[in-house]
Structure formats: structure tokens, C-alpha cells
Image (tube, rainbow, N blue to C red):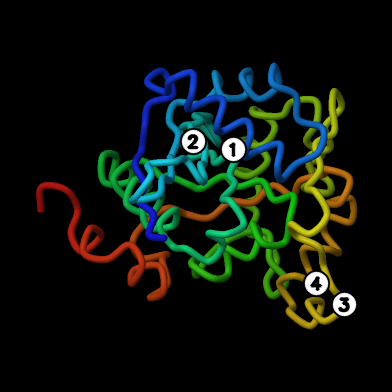
């Protein structure tokens, strides 16, 4: 069943939209309460909504917001992806990647003189795996140490968003108020998956992932940092900056 996605301001989401989003979230995560979900949603600016083309039923979403901070006297912005989930029957569909990529690069085009990063927090290996799949440069990673300049940016963004939960020494966010965990069967790591160096690194870097701990990650958001696979999915929309 084909999907179509759109970027919707959070304020424009209807009550039924929020109900459906919460239902999807609780199908995939343990420990989520409705007040927690609504509080997190209020902190975001946009939601990427996936619907079926036939019934218009919401089958996935990803919340987004822009974070701003200063690093060594330089203003830095990061697109933060919050709650992100797609119904199991649509795993493997690339519509979320397409819409998110088009949206992210549009933001990058609007401020060409200011660096923009993707700030991603990974509770499951599938989320972390998006980084090596679609980006040339991202951190942290198994094959190269994180450059000091990028580490400073990652620490600044993560500390600003999670001042009491982020540990710069480990790069891990450990929730202190409430633990939310992936349900069994969502991102279980079978032994054979550890042959993948990216997954093995994720497990070593974030040993508490099954208890709801999340690894803080960044990737520069620009066209040059996207791999051919990402360009192919996003398609013609990323060929030229807006107005070019």
C-alpha cells in the first residue's frame, strides 16, 4: 500500500491525528504516557506525517524542531528528530526518508552561511544505521575518532537539549524521570547482526540501549554529505537549491 508524507506544523495537528500518533507510539514503545507524548510534541515545531494513499490513515510520523546554540562564538543550528516510528507493515518504505530529506535540505538552503546539523538520538540500532547508510560524515562512528570541533558541537547541542540527562564522557542520554524502551521485536539485536561494524559499535557505545538509553549523534546537513542512495530516494527535489 503506497504511502505519502507531508510536513505539518505541530499546531495544525488535529485531536484525532494526535490520538493516532500516540497509538502508534505505544504499539512500539513501553513506558510512554499520553502526558509525556503531548509534552514532547509541544516542544517540536513540525511533524512529518505518513498516511496511506487509499485510506489516509496515519501509519507513521517523525517530530522535528530546530535547536540553536553557540559553539566557540559561532552560532550553530541542529535539526532534531524526536519521536519517530512507522507501523511494522510499512517497514522498508522510503517515503519518510524522502520527505525528511527534502525538508532538511530546504532548511539548509535557507541559511547557506550558517552550519546546520542533524541531531539524532538512537535507542535502537536501526535508527543509528541510518547514518552510515545515507551520510558520508557522521559522529560518533567506529572507524574514525570524532574531531574535536564536531565533538564540541555535539556536546553543546545535546547538553542544551538534555542538561541533566546527557553525559559528555559517554555520549549517552540516560533519562532520569521516566524510562521509555522499545518493545521486543522492534529492534532486537541477534548475534549475527554484530558482524556489522556499525551495529557492533552502537552496542558497545550504548550498552544500555535496551533500557531506554540513547546515543547522541550528529551529521552535517548539506547536499555534499549525502550518499548516492539518499540522493536517489529524495530525487529531483535536491538537484538545485531553492531559487537556483
Q: Is residue 27 above or below residue 188?
A: above
The reply to whether callout 1 and callout 3 are in contact (CB within 8 Å) is no
Residue at the spot x=29%, y=39% of the render? 111
138 or 130, nearer to the observer: 130
Look at mark 4 in the image and give the residue it sits on: 200
Look at mark 1 in the image and give the residue it sits on: 82
Considering only order in the chain, which callout, 3 or 2, is on the residue closer to the N terminus?
2
Residue at the spot x=75%, y=60% of the render? 187
Q: Secondary structure at mark 2?
A: strand
- CA neighbours of label 2 inside 10 A, class few (<14), some (14 to 19), many (20+): many
Cα separation between marks 2 and 1: 6 Å
The reply to whether callout 2 and callout 1 are in contact (CB within 8 Å) is yes
Cα separation between marks 3 and 4: 10 Å
Task: Classify residue 235 as left or right of residue 81.
Answer: left
Q: Is residue 103 above or below residue 185?
A: above
Cα separation between marks 2 and 3: 33 Å
Disc assigned to residue 191: 3
Q: Position of residue 12 (x, y in %)?
A: 37, 21
Q: Position of residue 151 (x, y in %)?
A: 65, 50
The reply to whether callout 1 and callout 4 are in contact (CB within 8 Å) is no
Considering only order in the chain, which callout, 1 or 2, is on the residue closer to the N terminus?
2
25 or 239, nearer to the observer: 25
Q: Position of residue 238 (x, y in %)?
A: 25, 60
Q: Is residue 158 above or below residue 178?
A: below
Look at mark 2 in the image and give the residue it sits on: 64
Considering only order in the chain, which callout, 4 or 3, is on the residue closer to the N terminus?
3
Task: Classify residue 83 as left or right of residue 49.
Answer: right
- CA neighbours of label 3 inside 10 A, class few (<14), some (14 to 19), many (20+): few
The reply to whether callout 2 and callout 3 are in contact (CB within 8 Å) is no
Q: Nearer the viewer, mark 1 or mark 4?
A: 1
Considering only order in the chain, which callout, 4 or 1, is on the residue closer to the N terminus?
1
Amino acid at each position: 500500500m503506497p504511502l505519502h508524507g507531508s510536513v505539518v506544523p505541530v499546531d495544525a495537528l488535529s485531536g484525532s491525528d494526535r490520538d493516532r500518533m500516540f497509538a502508534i507510539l505505544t504499539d512500539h514503545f513501553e513506558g510512554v504516557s499520553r502526558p509525556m507524548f503531548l509534552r514532547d510534541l509541544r516542544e517540536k515545531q513540525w511533524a512529518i506525517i505518513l498516511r496511506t494513499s487509499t485510506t489516509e490513515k496515519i501509519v507513521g510520523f517523525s517530530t522535528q524542531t530546530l535547536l540553536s546554540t553557540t559553539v566557540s562564538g559561532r552560532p550553530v543550528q541542529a535539526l532534531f528528530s524526536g519521536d519517530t516510528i512507522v507501523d511494522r507493515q510499512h517497514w522498508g518504505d522510503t517515503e519518510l526518508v524522502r520527505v525528511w530529506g527534502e525538508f532538511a535540505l530546504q532548511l539548509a538552503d535557507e541559511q547557506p552561511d550558517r552550519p546546520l546539523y542533524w541531531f539524532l538520538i538512537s535507542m535502537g540500532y536501526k535508527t543509528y544505521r541510518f547514518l552510515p547508510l545515507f551520510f558520508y560524515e557522521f559522529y560518533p562512528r567506529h572507524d574514525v575518532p570524532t574531531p574535536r570541533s564536531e565533538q564540541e558541537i555535539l556536546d553543546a547541542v545535546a547538553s542544551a537539549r538534555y542538561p541533566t540527562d546527557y553525559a559528555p564522557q559517554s555520549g549517552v542520554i540516560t533519562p532520569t524521570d521516566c524510562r521509555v524502551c522499545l518493545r521486543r521485536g522492534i529492534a532486537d539485536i541477534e548475534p549475527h547482526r554484530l558482524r556489522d561494524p556499525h551495529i557492533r559499535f552502537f552496542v558497545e557505545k550504548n550498552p544500555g540501549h535496551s533500557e531506554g538509553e540513547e546515543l547522541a549523534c550528529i551529521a552535517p546537513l548539506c547536499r555534499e554529505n549525502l550518499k548516492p542512495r539518499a540522493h536517489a530516494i529524495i530525487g529531483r527535489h535536491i538537484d538545485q537549491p531553492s531559487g537556483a
